[in-house]
Amino acid sequence: DSGVVQSPRHIIKEKGGRSVLTCIPISGHSNVVWYQQTLGKELKFLIQHYEKVERDKGFLPSRFSVQQFDDYHSEMNMSALELEDSAMYFCASSRTGGRSDYTFGSGTRLLVI
Amino acid sequence: GDSVTQTEGPVTLSEGTSLTVNCSYETKQYPTLFWYVQYPGEGPQLLFKVPKANEKGSSRGFEATYNKEATSFHLQKASVQESDSAVYYCALTHSWNMGYKLTFGTGTSLLVDP
């Protein structure tokens, strides 16, 4: 169990640019969620996929899209980046079925300049 | 929708003193309640969860009781250590559309002075 792996760890992009964040869940976990954390505290729910189907969407901007692939890894495509997109982005995964515990990755720090 | 409200921080305590972080929630579903902890530079990690009303969860000296009537889930520790300095999040989840979304409170920063 290598944990949830996120890449890259840090990224700097110019305003108006694009970025792709990747999340590899724990083996056997098909439920993946994304959160945005700003100001070092508030965790804002962005989107959730379960078995490759979008199940719930929160504060995900229309400029962003998220896809879950056959091996359950997830990618967040971000376009037309704005300064306020600067934040930590965490993904988390959990097993199918039951009220399983989420395991979070170490996050990607995005800075838009 | 769901909401979670917890003690505003930062909270500063001396080592050996007691901690209480208040948490209250609102949901129309039957939730499972969690406390998560986040250390600098890391993602949140589960401290413990309580799926059933009127039961207690605990870990590393921290504990909380799921009070369904009061819709509360306060975090307590009798004697904090410097290593407990972190941000603590109360959270809830319930089954929705075959998935389990976690709704977090705004977090409470704890700083323990040695």
Image (cartoon, coloured by chain):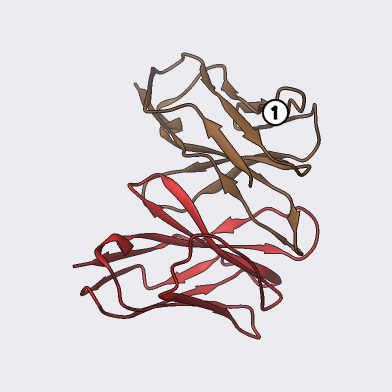
Chain colours: A red, B brown
Question: Does residue A1 appear in the picture of this structure?
Answer: no
User: Quadrant location of residue A41?
Assistant: top left
Q: Indicate the secondary structure of the residue bearing disc 1.
A: loop
- Under mark 1, the amino acid is Thr
Residue reaching furthest bottom?
A70
Query: How many numbered marks, from 0 up?
Result: 1
> How crowded is the residue under tag 1: few (<14 C-alpha within 10 Å), some, or many (20+)?
some
Closest to the observer, A67 or A95:
A67
Depicted A102 relative to depicted B21: above or below:
below
Closest to the observer, B61 or B66:
B66
Q: Quadrant of the C terminus of chain B?
A: top left
User: Quadrant location of residue A20?
Assistant: bottom left
Q: Position of residue A72 (x, y in %)?
A: 63, 78
Q: Which residue is mark 1?
A: B71
Q: Is residue A71 left or right of residue A109?
A: right
Residue at 64% x, 40% y: name it. B34
Closest to the observer, A35 or B35:
A35
Q: Position of residue B63 (x, y in %)?
A: 65, 27
Q: What chain letter is assigned to the residue under label 1?
A: B
Residue reaching furthest top?
B17
Q: Position of residue B59 (x, y in %)?
A: 64, 34
Q: Position of residue B28 (x, y in %)?
A: 74, 42
Question: Does residue A16 appear in the picture of this structure?
Answer: yes
Residue at 74% x, 25% y: name it. B67
Residue at 76% x, 66% y: name it. A96
